[in-house]
Amino acid sequence: MPALHPPDEAPRAAAWFVFRGDRLLVHAEGDHAALLDYPELVALGASFEDGHYLGRLGDVDCYALELDGALELPANSGLEGLRALYGRLPDDQYAIAGRAVQILLWDQTHRFCGRCGQPTVNAPAERAKLCPRCGLLSFPRLSPAVIMLVQRGDEFLLARNRAFAEGFFSVLAGFVEPGESLEEAVAREVREEVSLELRDIRYFSSQPWPFPHSLMIGFTAHYAGGEIHPQADEIIEAAWYSRRGELPRLPGKLSIARRLIDWFLSQADDTR
Ligand SMILES: [Zn+2]
């Protein structure tokens, strides 16, 4: 349950999501990772007054905290990126860690007003930085991106982006531009990246994507026309893949890309 301020009641159990940059401080043992507890963080010298209250998980108050770069980590702990922690922290803690890292990033990158340069303060009643001189409010940044599975009968479109590792394919995705609806962004991305036209663009689901501050909004769509022409500076290769055929290397279970693909693969054949 997200909140800006801790409740006034007596202090209860607390969980601290302690980051250095985009890496979380954990005890890691094989396939499992765990947060450090309060006494361990006290021993480490963490400055709790700089923590950001995040809200409550069950009976536990959750905080985000940036770790001073000079502090030496306990011998049995380490800093790990969130991608590497997927499936190793409990799912609810993993989701809160994604929130925590974005709030810390916002805190570090909005210390001065973007309009007049004055140092900002925390706004009293909402998660925002307030400029005391000109009144500008700066909220945590979220960059919405659309991601879409395009189907043609029992085939679907996969592409290899220049940024991907060798042999790795996924569905197309791109950031939403100002003034654009989500459906318009889906149609534009597919037109730009592979020159295809779409019909029946439908919302699928969404996923926070804290790398560093995206919100992925998933869609399905049907092919409506055109030939695949990859946009050379972004897409190396794009092709239709059959639901029943062999597939290339796909994104991991963490991503909504994989959820879209798994959803499509689980559907009965569609001859439209
Ligand atoms: Zn200002």
Image (cartoon, rainbow, N blue to C red):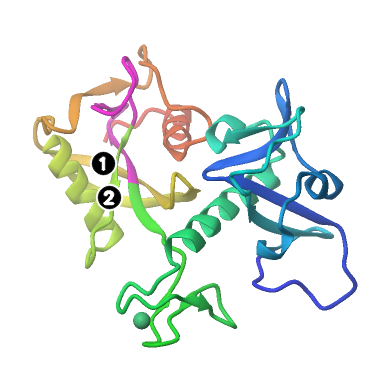
**What's the magenta region?**
147-170
Q: Name the residue at 35% across, 13% down.
A: 245
Q: Tell me the element at label 2.
A: strand
Image quarter of the N terminus: bottom right
Q: Name the residue at 65% across, 55% down.
A: 65
Relative horizontal placement of residue 114, taking residue 27 as reference (left or right): left
Relative horizontal placement of residue 226, taking residue 1 as reference (left or right): left
Q: Nearer the viewer, residue 32 or 67?
A: 67
Extreme residue toward the front, this view: 70
Instruction: Kindly report the distance in space between the C-alpha atoms of the residues bearing marks 2 and 1.
Output: 6 Å
- Residue designated by label 2: 200
Give coordinates of residue 258: x percent, y percent. Answer: 45, 32
Q: Nearer the viewer, residue 78 or 99?
A: 78
Amino acid type shown at disc 2: Asp
Q: Residue 158 has which mark?
A: none
Regarding ligand 1, which quadrant of the image does it lie in?
Answer: bottom left
Give coordinates of residue 221: x percent, y percent. Answer: 29, 44
